[in-house]
């Protein structure tokens, strides 16, 4: 029987180790634009290949890949545990369930994307936002009330509001869904046009969704 030093190249072990190393190094969220789900598939695939490669000599590439891969998986578990607790605490602070919080975050992404694509020629927030490309499920909050669009003097220049469980505007249970978005684990679409480099100075009043369009009131 050949010893480790006498053995040739264990291609499977090297391939598996490289897969695991890539998944580990690129795991920080958004690093180089590589999504975490893809990296998880790559990492678990690398662990399987490393395990199979132990049937051949030399075994060190597979052993190294398994050790690094297990450390990476432990990091993923810790990250998802932290993310769950972060979102849960944010939801509890707002009196929401995790499901309601997630639904509002997804609505924030869809509505913000629509508003960003309809900025004025000068880059300011549009006075009204047409929602023909937004799924109907994202137009209403968890209590079935339409979100309200508001032009503001914030850097983004606009926001979307939920009237909360009571369905009444300007009460204590109103929720700015772009604000809770920052507290969650979802990323809003980037600001576009002039808004990406300077804050808007426009203020306005919030309005409801009517016929799949947000209208800014006078």
Image (spheres, rainbow, N blue to C red):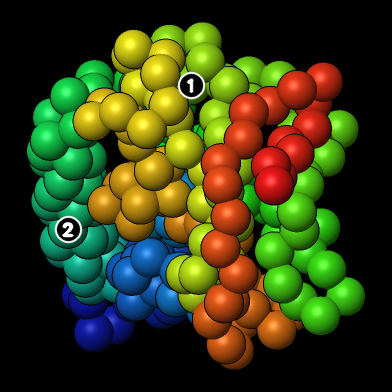
The image position of residue 50, as x and y in percent, is 34, 56
Q: Residue at x 29, y 82 (%)?
A: 6
Q: Residues within 10 Å of mark 1 (few under 14, many from 20)?
A: many
The image position of residue 217, as x and y in percent, is 69, 42
The image position of residue 41, as x and y in percent, is 47, 48
In the picture, measured across the screen, residue 60 lies left or right of residue 53, that is left
Give the number of callouts. Answer: 2
The vertical placement of 94 against 76, above or below, is above
The vertical placement of 32 against 185, above or below, is below
Q: Residue at x 35, y 52 (%)?
A: 179
Mark toward the start of the polypeptide (1 vs 2): 2
The part of the image, by quadrant, that contains residue 90 is: top left
The part of the image, by quadrant, that contains residue 158 is: bottom right
What whole-number distance in Å separates the C-alpha atoms at marks 1 and 2?
A: 34 Å
Q: Nearer the viewer, residue 194 or 138?
A: 194
Q: Quadrant of the N terminus?
A: bottom left
Tag 2, which secondary structure?
helix
Q: Which residue is mark 2?
A: 75
- Residue extending farthest bottom: 197
Q: Nearer the viewer, residue 148 or 31?
A: 148
Res. 141 mark: 1
């Amino acid at each position: 029987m050949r010893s480790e030093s006498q053995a040739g190249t264990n291609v499977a072990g090297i391939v598996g180790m490289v897969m695991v190393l890539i998944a580990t190094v690129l795991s920080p969220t958004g690093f180089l634009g590589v999504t975490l789900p893809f990296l998880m598939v790559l990492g678990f695939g690398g662990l399987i290949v490393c395990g199979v490669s132990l049937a051949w000599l030399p075994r060190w590439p597979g052993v190294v890949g398994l050790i690094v891969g297990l450390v990476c998986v432990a990091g993923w578990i810790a990250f998802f545990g932290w993310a769950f607790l972060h979102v849960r605490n944010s939801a509890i602070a707002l009196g929401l369930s995790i499901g309601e919080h997630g639904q509002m975050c997804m609505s924030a992404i869809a509505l913000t994307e629509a508003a960003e694509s309809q900025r004025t020629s000068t880059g300011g927030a549009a006075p009204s936002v047409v929602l023909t490309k937004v799924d109907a499920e994202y137009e209403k909050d968890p209590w079935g009330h339409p979100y309200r669009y508001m032009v503001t003097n914030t850097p983004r220049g606009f926001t979307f509001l939920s009237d909360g469980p009571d369905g009444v505007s300007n009460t204590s249970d109103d929720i700015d869904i772009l604000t809770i978005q920052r507290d969650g684990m979802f990323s809003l679409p980037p600001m576009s046009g002039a808004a990406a480099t300077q804050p808007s100075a426009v203020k306005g009043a919030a309005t409801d969704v009517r016929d799949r369009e947000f209208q800014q009131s006078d």
